[in-house]
Amino acid sequence: MFDLLTVFGLLSFAQIWLAIPLALAFSFAYAATRFESPREIFKRAATVGLWLFFFLALVGAILRFVV
């Protein structure tokens, strides 16, 4: 039958690597809509990217230990 542990167990560590390009694209798109200079875009993209990775890791850890 349907078991959440089985579903989350199927998600391997290799699939987490797919989130990196998505997070980078989101960070750069968000920063590029806010700033015009390349220096500010890269600075803001790095900040948003770090926050996004932290948030994703936090949600993943919560789901891993709760479910």
Image: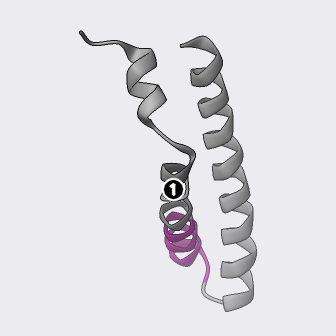
Front-most of 48 and 54?
54
Front-most of 10 and 30?
10
Query: Where in the figure is residue 55, as x and y percent of width and height?
Result: 65, 41
Residues in magenta? 24-35
**Image-based side of 23 in relation to 44, left or right:** left
Whether residue 28 is situated above or below residue 26 in the rendered picture: below
Secondary structure mostly seen in magenta is helix
Q: Give the residue at x 67% y 40%.
A: 57
Q: Give the residue at x 48% y 51%.
A: 15
Q: Give the residue at x 48% y 62%.
A: 22
Q: In which quarter of the image is the N terminus?
A: top left
The colour style of the image is: one colour
Q: Give the residue at x 38% y 25%.
A: 7
Question: In the figure, residue 37 lies in which quadrant?
Answer: bottom right
Identity of the residue furthest to the bottom in this view = 38
Q: Does the magenta stretch include residue 49?
A: no
Q: Is residue 25 magenta?
A: yes
Whether residue 6 is situated above or below residue 53 in the rendered picture: above
Query: Where in the figure is residue 25, as x and y percent of width and height?
Result: 50, 70
Front-most of 59 and 6?
6
Whether residue 39 is situated above or below residue 34 in the rendered picture: below
Q: Name the residue under label 1.
A: 19
